[in-house]
Amino acid sequence: MLGQYLITFRESFEAALIVSIMLSYIIRTRRRSLARYIWYGTYLSIVASLVIGLILWLMYGVLPKTLQALFESFTAFIAVGVLSFMVYWMAIKGKRVREELEKRIEAVATKGSIIGLASMTFIVVFREGLETVLFLTPFFINDAPVTIIGAVFGAITALTLSYCIFMAGVKINLLNFFYFTSILLILIAGGLAGYGVHELIEYHKEIGVNFGWLSEPAYTLNIPSNSLLHHKNLVGSILAVMFGYTVSAEWLRLIVHLSYLVVALPSVILVYKKR
């Protein structure tokens, strides 16, 4: 649940922060009447994100058992790709997000385009919503109740924090916030990459394709399935989401997981250190 909470918190916070910036700029420039169109775009983006999540879930439900492993692998790899791009993009562009956003708002508001303002809000918020859906899909498939609980609490925390920033002028160091959460998200992405490889191996086993020694266990921990430390139970599942922990991992899974971390972690840390 901790991983789902963190993912939803980070993405919801980014979306809420964007909406807060837009609303504060509209109010600051005495265009308060346009605020409702920002909310319209926000509501539509939330609905659209939930619809896409439902479609993905329904698609998974009607797939044959053999293809379900391939679907899980596919969604995990997409989540890793989008997550990596988002983290790196935020590391590079995050500092100028407010300036760029306010310039775009001014351009749209000056033209008096109500549809343009709602559309702009929809696009920027929907991007965060879509990312959240993609990230949570692999977790939702494996444990829907825990994923929902983590997502709800993550969203509530993010909205509360954003409201405090907007209403009370709370000052937090956003650069440090995004730096530390980016590192945690890279760790989660590494685990997702390994999980995607595992499901890919399972799919190929079902269709009779063998990867040789790459599909053989690199290690197997002597942990019973009823232990809290098993990756499907309470403590183990938290470690699984956060760090890709599992009681048994194939060589290919281990290689991909570690290779991703070796490349992604130093890259993100280096970008933030330069800033």
Image (cartoon, rainbow, N blue to C red):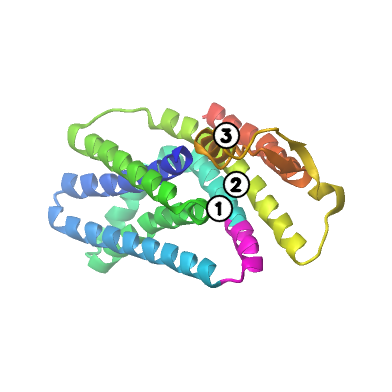
Residue 142 locus on image (x, y percent): 53, 53
Along the line of sight, the residue nearer the viewer: 246 or 275: 246
Disc 1, disc 2: CB below 8 Å? yes
**Which tag is nearer the camera, tag 1 or tag 3?**
3
Q: Which mark is residue 64?
A: none
Residue 129: x %, y % from top left: 40, 55
Residue type indicated by callout 3: Ser
The image position of residue 247, as x and y in percent, is 66, 38
Say which amino acid is labelled 2.
Answer: Leu
Dot 1: within a 10 Å radius of its alpha carbon, few (fewer than 14), some, or many (20 or more) residues?
many
Would you name the residue on which mark 1 appears? 79
Q: How far apart are labels 1 and 2 at the CA level?
A: 8 Å
What residue is pinned by disc 2?
A: 192
Q: Which residue is mark 3?
A: 227
Q: Which residues are magenta?
A: 63-75
Looking at numbered disc 1 in the image, what kind of residue is underneath it?
A: Ala
72 over 192 or under it: above or below: below
Q: Earlier in the sequence, mark 1 or mark 3?
A: 1
Of residues 126 and 6, which is closer to you in this image? 6
**Residue 2 relative to residue 262: left or right:** left
Quadrant location of residue 177? Answer: top left
Quarter of the picture holding the N terminus: top left
Q: Which residue appears at 38% of the width and 66% of the height? A: 51
Q: How many callouts does the rendering have? A: 3
Q: Is residue 64 magenta?
A: yes
Provide the secondary structure element on which disc 3 rests.
loop
Q: CA distance from mark 2 to mark 3?
A: 23 Å
| Tag 2–tag 3 contact (CB < 8 Å) | no
